[in-house]
């Protein structure tokens, strides 16, 4: 079993990993339909074409922003790794994926 060490992380007293994995899977399963509904509502509100929509208790504001990205793959091909390397920022990303266990 591989271990990832997260600096500064502490394990709560009484923490049982197997129980935590199953609880996390249950929570994610409960969140999924809520997220799907939230996405539907967002799409419907955006489709109205309005910048501001007032509810009885909340207000939604829809705005556009521009995002600029650099195609690092194309830069590598065009300029070469040696030229772009000083300008690259690399970070480690820790990922946790929960999947159902296969039962035979």
Image (cartoon, rainbow, N blue to C red):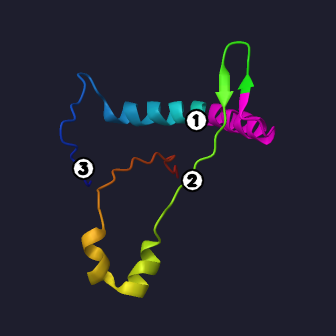
Report the Cα–Cα distance between label 2 and label 1: 33 Å
Tell me the number on the disc at residue 29. 1
The percent position of residue 56, horizontal first and vertical second, equals: 73, 13
* Dot 2 or dot 3, earlier in sequence: 3
Question: Is 37 displayed left or right of 79 in the figure?
Answer: right
Q: What element carries label 3?
A: loop
Q: Are marks 2 and 3 in contact (CB under 8 Å)?
A: no
Q: Does the magenta stretch include residue 65?
A: no
**How much space separates mark 2 and mark 3, taking CA atoms?**
36 Å
Q: Residue at x 51, y 51 (%)?
A: 102
Residue at 77% from the left image edge and 35% from the top image edge: 50
Q: Quadrant of residue 23?
A: top left
Q: Note whether 48 is above or below 14 in the view shown.
A: below
Counting residues from the start of the chain, the first of labels 2 and 1 encountered is 1
Specify the label residue 16 is tagged with.
Answer: none
The spot of residue 7 in percent (x, y) is 18, 42
Q: Is mark 2 on a helix, strand or loop?
A: loop
Percent position of residue 47, x then y: 79, 41
Q: How far apart are marks 3 and 1 (CA)?
A: 25 Å
Answer yes or no: do the residues labelled 2 and 1 have beta carbons within 8 Å?
no
> In the displayed structure, would residue 61 be above or below residue 46?
above
Which residue is the site of mark 2?
66
| Residue 15 image offset from top left, x and y in percent | 28, 27
| Crowding near the residue tagged with mark 3, few <14, some 14–19, many ≥20 C-alpha atoms within 10 Å | few
* Residue positioned 52% across, 52% down in the render: 104
The residue positioned farthest toward the right in the image shown? 48
User: Magenta stretch: dominant SS?
Assistant: helix
Residue at the spot x=42%, y=85% of the render?
A: 77
Residue at the spot of label 3: 4
Q: Give the range drawn in magenta.
A: 32-52
């Amino acid at each position: 079993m591989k271990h990832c060490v997260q600096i500064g992380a502490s394990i709560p007293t009484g923490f049982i990993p197997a129980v935590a994995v199953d609880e996390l899977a249950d929570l994610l399963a409960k969140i999924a339909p809520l997220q799907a509904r939230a996405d539907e509502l967002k799409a419907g509100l955006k489709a109205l074409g309005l910048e501001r929509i007032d509810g009885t208790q909340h207000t939604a504001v829809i705005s556009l922003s521009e995002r600029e990205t650099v195609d690092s793959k194309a830069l590598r091909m065009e300029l070469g790794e040696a030229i772009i390397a000083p300008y690259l920022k690399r970070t480690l990303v820790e990922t946790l994926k929960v999947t159902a266990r296969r039962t035979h």
